Image: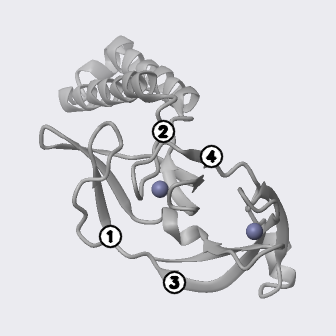
Amino acid sequence: MSFTYVIFDCDKCDFHGNSTITWGDFRYVNESKETNVYCDLGWCFECNKLVPIEDFSDSDRVIDLIELTTKELEAKANNKFSIAFSKRDDKVYLIKEILEYSQRLKFIRERIGSEKCLMCGSMEIKPFDGDYSFEPKEYMKRPFNSTKNTGFIHPGCGGGIIAKYNPVRINLESLSRYYSIDGKPLDSETD
Ligand SMILES: [Zn+2]
Ligand SMILES: [Zn+2]
């Protein structure tokens, strides 16, 4: 799989960054069990650059998933005709999914407000609250020159961060990074 990405420049200083820093496989490890880290782009005042940060903004989406999956499970349980045919495994699978979503919700509730930089573990971070999405109709016209003002202000500098669409596809490295459940980096495969 290869992907296009976005390059960030400051309009006031020579700061550079890019969106590929949030790529890769970020995992929490707890008692030899691994779960996904949801990460987002942010600014770390310790690293002094754009970094991947923990993201706990998915609770609404998780609640929707619990409702949907519960309905699916109820439908399977109530449909007398299907009972004979539906495999028990299907229901077990749905129950496991609901359990996983509930664990995510519990985790969000415990950790929200203590989001960390996924590079150094610092809590001195700020989510990237600018817009760096490019619609196909925006970049199809001028693929090598599509830029936009993200609205994000370069911390400590005051310049505006400009996003530039990069149409050259690059491969997603299968780099795994591991974290404790409080978001502190453990030894990574590569550094
Ligand atoms: Zn700057
Ligand atoms: Zn950091």
Q: Nearer the viewer, residue 88 or 68?
A: 68
Looking at the image, which residue is at 52% across and 29% down?
113
**Whether the residue under disc 4 has CB within 8 Å of ligand 2:** no
Residue lying at the far left in this picture: please name it: 32
Q: Residue at x 69, y 75 (%)?
A: 15
Image coords of residue 61 (percent x, y): 55, 32
Q: Is residue 24 above or below residue 68?
A: below
Indicate which label's residue lies in the foreground, 2 or 3: 2
Disc sitting over residue 175 in the figure: 1
Q: Earlier in the sequence, mark 3 or mark 4?
A: 4
Secondary structure of the residue carrying numbered label 1: loop
Kindly report the distance in space between the C-alpha atoms of the residues bearing marks 2 and 1: 21 Å
| Residue at mark 4 | 126
- Give SS at disc 4: strand
Q: Amino acid at mark 4?
A: Lys
Give the mark toward the camera: 3 or 1: 1
Which badge, 2 or 1, is on the more N-terminal residue?
2
Q: Nearer the viewer, mark 2 or mark 1?
A: 2
**Distance (Cα) linking label 3 and label 4:** 27 Å
